[in-house]
Amino acid sequence: MKPQVSMLLMAWFGVLRCVGAEFFTSIGHMTDLIYAEKDLVKSLKEYILVEEARLSKIKSWANKMEALTSKSAADPEGYLSHPVNAYKLVKRLNTDWPALEDLVLQDSAAGFIANLSVQRQFFPTDEDEMGAAKALMRLQDTYKLDPDKISKGELPGTKYQATLSVDDCFGLGRLAYNEGDYYHTVLWMEQVLKQLDAGEEGTTAKTQVLDYLSYTVFQLGDLHRALELTRRLLSLDPSHERAGGNLRYFEHLLEEEREKVLSNQTTEAEPATQEGIYERPVDYLPEREVYESLCRGEGVKLTPRRQKRLFCRYHHGNRTPQLLIAPFKEEDEWDSPHIVRYYDVMSDEEIERIKEIAKPKLARATVRDPKTGVLTVASYRVSKSSWLEEDDDPVVAQVNRRMQHITGLTVKTAELLQVANYGMGGQYEPHFDFSRRPFDSGLKTEGNRLATFLNYSHEQDAFKRLGTGNRVATFLNYMSDVEAGGATVFPDLGAAIWPKKGTAVFWYNLLRSGEGDYRTRHAACPVLVGCKWVSNKWFHERGQEFLRPCGSTEVD
């Protein structure tokens, strides 16, 4: 079989060379892996057919030779007395057996191996596997999912059944352990034990799990449980050298603890946890709990009083001629700051076209370092994005004009249309769209619990080089429905906005004074189930002077 690679794969490779790896950051790019795997399966089945044909020939020869040698070995001299038999014996050993040797040594795997070798250089990397594992754990934390539910694939809105085997769960636990994430290590190693105890088979041994788990709970300060798990490990494998050493060490520590209790005449310290339940460690995000609650649809501060101030209407963009005949449906999502949603902003055809031209350009989304102003990737933003110019396709110019008509702002000083596709557990943690410049430090922020903490006086003016001022407003198009998760939330407001395909939300990032409105700090929640596509336009200050006049006070 000659090495060959399909034209589909060659086209796929071309795309990958342009966009790089990091598959886990974009579901759109991960779909390419489905087709690559399908091609590999096809190649593998072709190899199996060739191999089966080769083995069938070898088996047929063996059966034929078995019957012949049984007859000849019963009476060698009598058999060879026939000159034809004598000739055929010589011929077989001189010609036929060497031919069989060639058949046995024939490398029928060459085509499959060649295909696999070409594709392997574009396979997901260790970074992708780690990113995918962290994504599952992020979903687990954000949406308070039990490991057993994830393992059984019991997620809301799913169309396909997917489960995690014992070995899959062990892999997750081991990856967490290697990252020093002992909280998730315990959760997944305990899930492995649960599935093993239920009788599920796998290559992972219970002793392996107990080895990881015992040392992990020790690292979490639970000496009593570490001792218990180590003893359990030794009951299964008394010769386990590391476990034996750990047991002696843990017993020594426990004895020292008891001596301290006796010498101080105090009661013995309680175990670090109750029934092996460990607290999730505190991280860098001050509003983590509020943010994740909103992602789950909890803690939304849409009170009846506030709801009475929200309306829906037809919007004609200050009597813009293009919208007088066909105004857009506008719905208030929040009163202050004013956040609105527009319906039927983009058609299905426009969405598909924009996705089509954006996909080859998708690259890992970056954030601007607040100290240096340099663009860099970050774990708190998991998506891929691309920037589209009006010259790329008429539909881009068409959508840009529509956003200008709806908002009444000019797109001449706006940024290019950004298209983003979120990956596994894709998210963008709480952030501001505007640049927090030094003069914002004097802003009156009484009652805003986040402004003081998040106002960096040394932050770089991220948009200074553009010469168009700060980002005055954000127009966010939802280009897909999301089965579960993926909301846009505003932690300081207690607001949550859910994606609806074809709709768009709009808000001002700056007050009329030009100062940043810190209430607009927002986030894209992790996508639990589905594929989230969005596009957005950031309008800048310059050119808006008469379209959105300045206010008379600092906080207008």
Image (cartoon, helix red, strand yellow):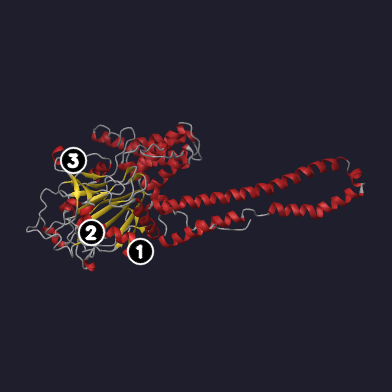
- State left or right for residue 436 relative to residue 247: left
Which element carries disc 3, helix, strand or loop? loop
Residue at mark 2: 404
- State left or right for residue 15 relative to residue 466: right
Q: Kindly give the residue lying farthest to the front in the view shown.
A: 325
**Residue type indicated by callout 1:** Asp
Q: Residues within 10 Å of mark 1 (few under 14, many from 20)?
A: few
User: Looking at the image, which residue is at 22% across and 60% down?
Assistant: 539
Which element carries disc 1, helix, strand or loop? helix
Q: Are marks 3 and 1 in contact (CB under 8 Å)?
A: no
Q: Report, in whole angstroms, how far the alpha carbon at label 3 lies from the one at label 1.
A: 41 Å
Front: mark 3 or 2? 2
Residue at mark 3: 302
Q: Are marks 2 and 1 in contact (CB under 8 Å)?
A: no
**Residue type indicated by callout 3:** Leu
**Residue type indicated by callout 2:** Gln
Please provide percent x and percent y for residue 173: 40, 43
Q: Which mark is residue 220?
A: none
Which element carries disc 2, helix, strand or loop? helix
Q: Residues within 10 Å of mark 2 (few under 14, many from 20)?
A: some
Point out the tag, 3 or 2, that comes first from the N-terminus.
Answer: 3
Instruction: Report the quarter where the C terminus lies.
Output: bottom left
Please provide percent x and percent y for residue 53: 68, 48
Is residue 248 something one can see in this rendering? no
Q: Which mark is residue 392?
A: 1
Identify whether 176 is placed above or below 227: below
- Viewer-proximal residue, 199 or 224? 199
Which quadrant of the structure image shows residue 415? bottom left
Q: Kindly give the residue lying farthest to the left in the view shown.
A: 552
